[in-house]
Image: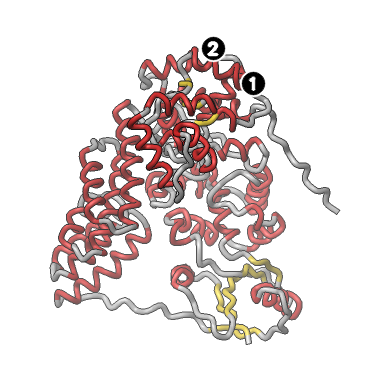
Amino acid sequence: MAKPKESVELKEGYYLDNFERLLAHVFEVYSDLLPKRYHKFNDDFAALSENAKRLFVRLSMRTKSFYRAQKLNYQEIKWQEAVRELEEASLLEVNPLIEWPGILDPFTVSELKEFYKELTGKRAPKGKREDLLQAFTMLFEEREQECYELLFKHDTLLWPLFSEEWEILKLLFFGSRFQDMEQFILEDLGVMRFEPIVIDKENRLYHNWNEVKVSYLWSNLHAELWEACALKEREEATLLFNEIKKLKFKSSPLKRRYSRSANLYGKLLESLGEAEEAKKIYATSLLEPARERLARLLLKEDKAKEALRLCEDILETPQSESERYFARFFREKVKKALGLDYEKLKRLKLPPESPVAVTWERGKRVEEQVLSHLMKEQGFRGFYCENFYFSTLSALLFWREYWKSAPGVFYHPFEQAPRDLKSGGFFIRMEEELNERADYWRSLSKKELIKEVLSLYDVKKGVACRLCHWKRVEKSALKLLLNHMPLEDLLKITLQILKDPRQYQSGFPDLFLVDSNGGFFLGEVKSPNDSIQVSQKRWIDLFLKWSLPFAILRTK
């Protein structure tokens, strides 16, 4: 019987260690870009006692702007001493004169009622919290000083300074100011481990301070734009998008961020029936699905010639397999609309189905029952693979290429994939090196290939990787697959996944099976009334093109 895993406890002050690790990384990679105030903060923070450092980090990592000292519950921190030290270092403001009624946010309704009675000698007005705040606002206008003194008599308010700078430090580390420190904690607990990534000044995301400022401003505006678009607030969205347009997006990563906003705003305009305006916005975007949406709108407006030219452009320089796939089919539709000769693309002709008679067992998935039946009754060997095995192999076979650093590809040490993987940019960027790696695998004997891949599996199992499904992939099943699937077939499948993970990480057949002669085939299990899905048809189309052994296993 396997021993239960021992629980791992976070060591005292783990959050300070993680904060200092973040600081060290940012200053190592971006020290030449950071303004003087950041260097001063780094020096001032380093000079603090550990007690004061801990309080500063605790407060900085929380979401509010200011806090009540009485509500602090950090057993490892002597907060009074820490507050004095932070105030002397100008890293904390004590009892700040925050505007009313915002300063009342941390206090409960019952506390506010007591404050009101103490100030006026009268009972607080009945009603909701909003009514009570309104009454306090009127009091504040008449007795400002007394109101502040009363609050500070009952509790000490703490306002950690350097908050905007902390947001920018997170932006420099994570590439996003909205990401928290959870990844540090998962690593501390041993829940996740990460591939070592080279992130240095050569491969960093930002190369001047203006890029950092633009990215920071964009992140704030884009978050508001997303909310406005979700609520279909056309006027507000327009104001926000116009502010985004004023920013100078010069580097490729920043241009992609602008394109995300353009796609979002264009989609809103299109949904509101403003096709002409939507087209103008889509035309400025570098990201999918802008060109697809633009082509569809052009055809809808009887501008078929422009739509055809756009489809030809997409086919010449596709951003991904899915964009190429769209242009291939849509081009023929446009040609037909223009009265030109066009290729009538046939619907996928599915291979004949193989009926499988199974004895149903309650509580077991149909795929498991079919696999069990084929192994017991017909002598097959195999396993349930679906999307797990070949996705994992697409990373294992090309591990070095997957994790190779390049400018703007990895932002921080906790990455699980290159940033351009989903968009298809990874394959375009690394195609030559991927083909070289494929040639390396071809140079090995079957025995050498299996030994090296399984050794890599042992070493890398558990490393956080977007393509890997470690909990669903068994070593013995991998060995069976590598033994019986020809390498060329394996390379075709794994490279296809890397071309466009969004489209090809799903829809893969359920079963990998080996017959008594050692030949393999892939089986898609379908119950009597189940139909083939679009994602499955993509794979079946390729299997037929590649002449890969494949069968639809229809239960009865």
Q: Give the residue furthest to the right.
A: 1
Q: Residue furthest front?
A: 121
- Disc 2 from disc 1: Cα separation: 17 Å
Q: Percent position (x, y) of residue 336?
A: 19, 76
Q: Earlier in the sequence, mark 2 or mark 1?
A: 2
Residue 526 visible in rendering = yes
Q: Nearer the viewer, residue 555 or 2?
A: 2
Q: Residue at x 31, y 49 (%)?
A: 225
Which quadrant of the figure contains the C terminus?
bottom right
Q: Position of residue 175 (x, y in %)?
A: 42, 37
Q: Is residue 544 above or below residue 481?
A: below
463 displayed left or right of 546: right
Q: Which residue is mark 1?
A: 78
* Residue type for callout 2: Ala
* SS type, badge 2: loop
- Eyeballing the image, is 291 above or below 53? below
Instruction: Select label 2 or label 1 by which is in front.
Output: 1
On the rendered structure, is 9 left or right of 250?
Answer: right
Disc 2 crowd, CA 10 A, few/some/many (<14, 14-19, 20+): few
- Does residue 435 show up? no
**Observer-nearest residue: 522 or 250?**
250
Report the quarter where the N terminus lies. Answer: bottom right
Give the camera-side residue of 488 and 29: 29
Q: Residue at x 54, y 24 (%)?
A: 56
Q: Quadrant of residue 41?
A: top left
Q: Residue at x 65, y 46 (%)?
A: 461
Badge 1 density bin: few <14, some 14–19, many ≥20, Cα 10 Å: few
- Looking at the image, which residue is at 20% across and 39% down? 246
Q: Amino acid at mark 1?
A: Lys
Element type where label 1 sits in the image: loop
Q: Dot 2 corresponds to which residue?
A: 47
Q: Which percent across, then down, holds residue 371? A: 68, 74
